[in-house]
Image: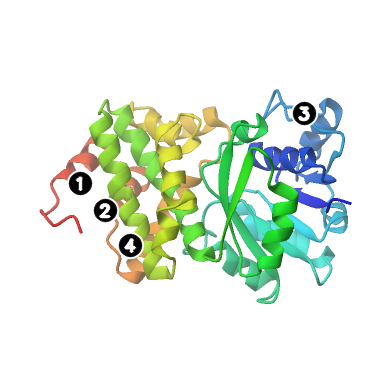
């Protein structure tokens, strides 16, 4: 018998992961908090709003009842936006058994000054709870389309990684293991900020030179912050670091990149958010990343200028000029 899994978050990413697990033969339950959305999924057997064109396997069911999701499996995969992560855990916690295990595919910080999501899990549950984080260069539509994909799952419990391999690993979904929860989370969160920056640069009409420089120096920012927080250098050069950064900075499937692109073209922030109609994680992550960096005395100029554009009404072209006019220094 294949293990069961509950997937919490019925957006594009949660739906893609639920489809993946179900295709692998695992009984899967997808939870969402909006009854009308879940009813549409139940009727159409497809997420026509966020991931159209991918019918649900027979062993994928849906619910809007958190108790049902908690009772379905001891393994809970959280795929909600990071700002809703803690609230979702608090709803879930009273209904879970003591041996429940938490894995998340959310990318971002808790909106409290920069807590990492594993710290939120430890506060809501305990330090004894089995935890894991899934991250890497993944677009939901390509996972649902069964395109070859590689990700990282980080956990301190090797047995939990083995369980997740049985559920998620497949012929076209390759999983690499890690014990670096901090590095994997930092890479997944900060790359969203840099994707906004890359989009802004392209929206301003700059070319490949600019984009390559931004990605490279952006990776340096991720590494400086991540190493200060306890992440490992090799993580940032892997799928959850460089891989995810390249993906989200260079392809217009990235909501963060599309958002930055529109800002660079002079469009209004709120108009673009309404048009995208899904979470743009890099907006909140810019604030949380800057707070973390200042707390630890880390220099992150690209992130800082992106924050100024998002929160201080700095014109995108002025932000670029500010970066270019910084004091000359050695690369390393």
Report if the CB atoms under discs 2 and 1 are less than 8 Å apart: yes
Q: Which residue is mark 1?
A: 323
Question: Residue pushed farthest top?
Answer: 53
Mark 4 → mark 3, Cα distance in angstroms: 42 Å
Q: Nearer the viewer, mark 1 or mark 4?
A: 4
Farthest residue to the front: give it: 171
Sequence-earlier tag: 2 or 1: 2
Closer to the N terminus: mark 3 or mark 2? 3
- Image location (x, y in percent) of residue 170: 69, 42
Residue 8 locus on image (x, y percent): 73, 49
Question: Rounded to the nearest whole Å, what is the CA distance between mark 3 and mark 1?
Answer: 45 Å
Q: Secondary structure at mark 2?
A: helix
Q: Which one is in front, 181 or 12?
A: 181
Picture residue at 70% right of the left edge, 23% below the top: 53
Tell me if label 4 and label 3 are in contact, CB under 8 Å.
Answer: no
Callout 3: SS: loop
Real-space Cα separation, disc 3 to disc 2, in angstroms: 43 Å
Cβ atoms at labels 3 and 1 below 8 Å apart: no
Please provide percent x and percent y for residue 154: 58, 61
Can residue 14 be seen by looking at this rendering? Answer: yes
Query: Could you tell me which residue is drawn at 30 percent across and 69 percent down?
Result: 297
Q: Which residue is mark 2?
A: 301
Q: Earlier in the sequence, mark 4 or mark 3?
A: 3
The residue that mark 3 highlights is 46
Q: Position of residue 159 (x, y in %)?
A: 71, 66
Q: Horizontal placement of 213 versus 80: left or right? A: left
Q: Earlier in the sequence, mark 3 or mark 1?
A: 3
């Amino acid at each position: 018998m294949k293990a069961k899994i509950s997937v919490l978050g019925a957006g594009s990413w949660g739906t893609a992961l639920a489809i993946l697990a179900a295709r692998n033969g695992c009984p899967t339950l997808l939870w969402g908090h909006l009854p009308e959305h879940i009813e549409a999924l139940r009727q159409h057997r497809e997420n026509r709003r966020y991931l159209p064109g991918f019918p649900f396997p027979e062993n994928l069911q849906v619910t809007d009842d958190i108790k049902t999701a908690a009772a379905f499996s001891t393994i809970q995969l959280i795929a909600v936006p990071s700002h809703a992560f803690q609230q979702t855990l608090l709803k879930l916690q009273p209904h879970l058994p003591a041996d429940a295990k938490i894995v998340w595919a959310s990318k971002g910080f808790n909106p409290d000054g920069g807590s990492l999501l594993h710290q939120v899990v430890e506060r809501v549950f305990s330090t004894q709870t089995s935890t894991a984080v899934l991250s890497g260069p993944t677009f939901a539509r390509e996972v649902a389309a069964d395109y070859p994909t590689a990700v990282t799952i980080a956990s301190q419990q090797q047995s939990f990684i083995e369980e997740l391999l049985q559920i998620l690993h497949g012929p076209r979904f390759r999983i690499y293991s890690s014990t670096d929860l901090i590095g994997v989370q930092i890479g997944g969160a900060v790359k969203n900020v840099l994707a906004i920056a890359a989009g802004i640069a392209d929206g301003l009409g700059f070319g490949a030179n600019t984009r390559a420089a931004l990605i490279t120096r952006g990776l340096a920012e991720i590494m400086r912050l991540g190493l200060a927080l306890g992440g490992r250098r090799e993580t940032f050069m892997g799928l959850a670091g460089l891989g995810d950064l390249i993906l989200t900075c260079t392809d217009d499937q990235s909501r963060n990149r599309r958002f930055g692109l529109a800002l660079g073209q002079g469009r209004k922030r709120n108009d673009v958010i309404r048009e995208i109609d899904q979470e743009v994680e890099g907006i909140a992550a810019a604030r949380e990343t800057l707070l973390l960096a200042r707390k630890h005395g880390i220099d992150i100029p690209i992130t800082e200028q992106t924050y100024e554009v998002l929160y201080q009404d700095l014109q995108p072209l002025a932000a670029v000029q500010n970066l270019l006019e910084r004091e000359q220094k050695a690369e390393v």
